[in-house]
Amino acid sequence: MIRVNGEPLSWHPGKTVEDVIREKNYRFPLLIVRINGRLVPREDYGKTEIPDGAEVDVIHLMSGG
Amino acid sequence: MMNREVNDITIEIDGKRVTVPEDTAILDAARRAGVYVPSLCSSDLVEPYGACRLCLVEVDDGSRTRLVTSCNFPVRKPLKVSTSSDRVKRNRKTVLEMMLARWPEVPLVKDLAGAEGLTGARYVHPNVDLNPNACVLCGLCVRICEQGIWEKIVNFSGRGVDRSIRMPYDSLQPHCVGCGACAEICPTGAIEMVDDPNRPYDAEMIRKAGMRITREMIKYDEQQCDMRGVGTAHLVEVMDAYDLLPVENYRFGRHEDTLKIESRVFREKYFSPGKPDGCWLGCTMSCAKAIEGYELKTGPYKGRKVLVDGPEYETVAGASNMGIFDPDFVVEYNFYCDTYGLDTISFSTLTAFVMECYKAGILDEEKTEGLKIPFGASDAAMELLHLIAQGRGFGRVAGKGIRYMKKYFVEHFGADPDFLQDIGMEAKGMEYSEYVTKESLAQQGGYGIALKGAQHDEAWLIFMDMVNKQIPTFEDKAEALHYFPMWRTWFGLCGLCKLPWNDIEPPDNAETDEPAKVPEHVKGYCEFFEGMTGEPQTMDSLVRMSEKVYNFQRVFNLRMGFGTRKHDVIPYRSMGPVTVEEYESRKERYDSQLEEQVGLDPRNMSTGEKLAALRKFREGQYEKLLDAVYKRRGWTDNGVPTVEKLSDLGVDFPEVMELVRKHGG
């Protein structure tokens, strides 16, 4: 189990940032992702695996009028 | 964004192996591999052009060896590349000698030639130019003007040895706003900015700050918000994904038919490609779009082909709010709202209210004088729009807005005033803009406390609050409802657009302390102000400018009979579910909130009881939010700026002080 923005989410070995974004349907493009406080560069979402028990922040910035 | 699978390909450059995505230019691959290749006409801001020929390399694809310009040669299969073979060096030297013959004093040319062992040319060019800032015809200025700024102010003129860079007719072009992108990208300093009609204190500071935004727009926009491609309409599918797109008078936040009106549809079938309808010349965001040749189906111009300003997010979301998912309708009602001088937000929100009243039986065909107008009735919505503009029939009533209609329906049709207050989405008499706020308390405050009425442009906090959970306490929310409204007010004070602040993000924004504020862009706005006036600024000083005006505006509201706590009241539809149908549609969410936040066991409660309990809780939360925000802003419990606050801000004019004292300030 991991926590994403404070809410629990199931975990499996090899689960990546991209998997979480897809599962949570986070379609907004301006995201900042941190795993246990550590920043994950956007180009690494597909290859960064999340460890079990991690606190994941997917910070959405603002956009629009 | 591209969905095509892109393969990685490994090539060898001077013996170094590097893996790059298919279609990467060899020059970019070389830079990634740390191999230097000279170039004069390439830039990461414009398409490659192959003009200077300095980036020549020798490519061996297994079947033959040939010379190519590396800036525009795409990698599509494994290659062996040599950047300094004898053949390459010989050709590069010839090119540089020709440059040196024509522009012998340009430092960049001399440096590049010197690196190849050349100190002078063996001949003199007939058009030799001894200016050290001579134009070397690299075409960077032409390309950035056309591709980056979407203008064609500078271009090539003449042929052969007479080729040169010119403005049309050799005169200053009135539609050149002096953005300075051409001067900024010029590698020799041949373009100098000389005309600054506004006489700023430091034009260079303004241009540098503007160029940083231009650079970000050109490089990152397509991967970020795609404002240049589709504008704010990209938010339609985003809001639907987060249950925030208003559907049927804000009853719901998503719909299976949203894909019919998402931004892709407008990009592929409606927008004129490459023709932005920007608010002002030289804007590199150019988020406004144009639709050409649309044939109108209704109204006084029926059958005419017209140009329509491309719909923004709010206009498209206004359609879903009426339960309409027809892109033609979006274009048609957008055109007629523009033509009649009506606001698409007010029209769509008030029509959604009319439709819900129709559904609830408060209205019928007799009361609407013949309009059959349930949710989704696009023909009836268009007819209502024309009636409003003409001041005829039911349009006479609807055109006066939701606040008027609520009173009218109670007085003339015996409607339940409490129900109308719950579903009539207006505050301070202005219709709500197009976001569902039920799950974001901070955004409810953003709408309710906004000085002009229910608009999100003072503060858009839904993601911070509902998705990120960044502002969990009342104090956190109050701080956000202090900073962002003040910051956004500043754009209005200066007549600047806020979209370049947060619809594009610098690449290192994530690493800053407060990414939500986009500190690099705040710094840029400080430089705009300083460059214009000569007065250095900080984030705090800009906010303080706004605070003076904002508080003065609140006092103005007070003087006009608004401006106290009772005027910050919002309809319950923006706080939570009004009807059983709404509650049941998100039953799991609301039940768990009752259990976790209210401490009730929903299993033994009817939906009516649950609705009432949730409502009591949420209304209580909103009151606590008002308390916290008023405190943070230095206002009384009744939402009136205090004498102390106004004195501190220097807004202590006698008439102002007398008024706030009368209201306990």
Image (spheres, grey):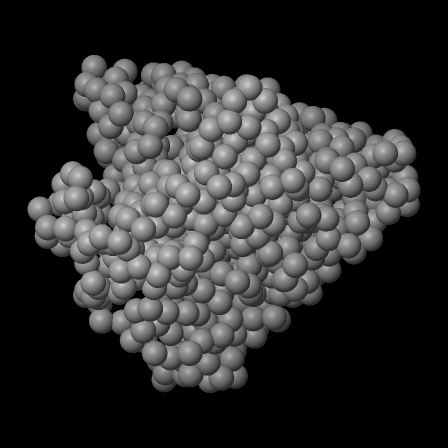
- Residue B178 coordinates in the image, percent (x, y): 25, 57
Q: Residue at x 29, y 75 (%)?
A: B201
Residue B109 seen from this side: yes
Q: Residue at x 50, y 34 (%)?
A: B58
Left or right of residue B611, residue A27 in this image: left
Left or right of residue B253, residue B378 in this image: left
Residue B250 seen from this side: no
Image height of A36 relative to B227, above or below: below
Left or right of residue B102, residue B530 in this image: right
Snapshot quadrant of residue A48: top right
Image height of B384 relative to B151, above or below: above
Work out whether residue B41 or residue B326 is closer to the camera in this orientation and state it.
B41
- Residue B132 coordinates in the image, percent (x, y): 26, 65
Snapshot quadrant of residue B364: top left
Image height of B28 relative to B132, above or below: above
Q: Residue at x 25, y 57 (%)?
A: B103
- Residue B651 coordinates in the image, percent (x, y): 41, 80
Work out whether residue B636 or residue B154 is closer to the camera in this orientation and state it.
B154
Q: Residue at x 60, y 41 (%)?
A: B14
Work out whether residue B445 or residue B69 is closer to the camera in this orientation and state it.
B69
Snapshot quadrant of residue A42: top right
Q: How many marks?
A: 0
- Residue B109 coordinates in the image, percent (x, y): 34, 57
Image height of B524 relative to B383, above or below: below
